[in-house]
Image: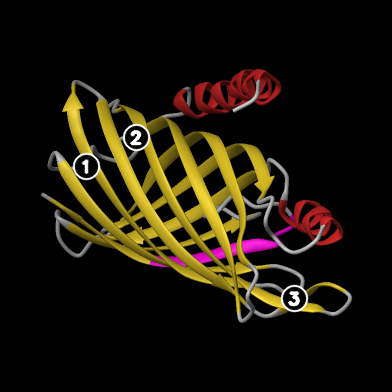
Amino acid sequence: MSEGNINRAMKSLLPLLLVAAAAHAQTPTVKAQSGNFSLTADNYMIARDVDDFDGMAYGVKAHVWDHVSLTLSYADASSDPFELISGLNMNLAARRFSLGAEYDIHTGPGALTLSLAFAETAGRAESSALGDAFKNQQFIFGARYAMALGQGFTASLAATKFISDFDPQAGFSTAPARAALADRFDGSPFSVGLTLAYAPTDNVSIHLTYATEDSLLGLAGADNTLSFGVRATF
């Protein structure tokens, strides 16, 4: 990533840490997650203007030391058909890989999580012969605070900042199409999400999340994201 994007990433970390510190100052009310290894699967619906995305994401989290865990995720999403420029109708298929780390703070029944990840998304134009459309490398900073509601229910509030390096592929269509692609998807969104989870057992939970912006791919221009998923902990 460019030096400018790295500098922006460092500047974006400070407000997230302030949010995390403010959350940590509250009385925590959720217990630490049992187990040292978890698997998640989520169905995502990203609302945009006309090019909504639907997709699946799969994640692995492994506790490695004290409060530190490593995370790995993969996502596969496709957009609705849309007109990029006059006469060019297309839809996109995006694949995203992410590797990161999380730091969990458990004070009594409360849970605060700070996260940092690096992700790369590759977009490919479908329903045409255009092929590879873009690559997007990102640093992703996150802060999440969870609170128990009782009877197995938990609510959590998360703030996520994407720092993107969006790169239309040189072989994609024409120069105006590449410019339109960057104008449509390039950006570094800040997403705030609310999750409601229910755990029928200590090792399995289901969750529903509403987030502002595109909380899956981190592409600019989204209205919101709705996801539903399940987590298994071992």
Q: Name the residue that disc number 1 marks.
A: 33
Q: Is residue 234 left or right of residue 221?
A: left
Residue 220 in the image, given as x and y percentages of width and height = 71, 52
Front label number (3 vs 1): 3
The residues bearing labels 3 and 2 have C-alpha atoms spaced at a distance of 38 Å
Report the residue at 71% width, 21% height from top. 4
| Precedes in sequence: disc 3 or disc 1 | 1
Which secondary structure, mark 2? Answer: strand
Q: Mark 1 is on which residue type?
A: Gln
Q: Which residues are magenta?
A: 221-228
- Where does label 2 land, which residue? 111
Q: Which amino acid lies under the numbered mark 2 shown in the image of this protein?
A: Ala
Q: In the rendered image of this protein, does residue 75 appear above or below residue 190?
A: below
Q: Residues within 10 Å of mark 3 (few under 14, many from 20)?
A: few
- Foreground: 12 or 117? 117
- Please, what secondary structure does the residue beneath circle 3 have? loop
- Mark 1 is surrounded, within 10 Å at the Cα level, by few (under 14), some (14 to 19) or many (20 or more) other residues, namely some
* Residue of label 3: 50
Three-letter amino acid code of the residue under disc 3: Val
Whole-percent x, y for residue 109 in the image: 27, 35
Q: In the visual, does 195 lie left or right of 214?
A: left
CB under 8 Å between callouts 2 and 1?
yes
Ranked by sequence position, the earlier of labels 3 and 2 is 3
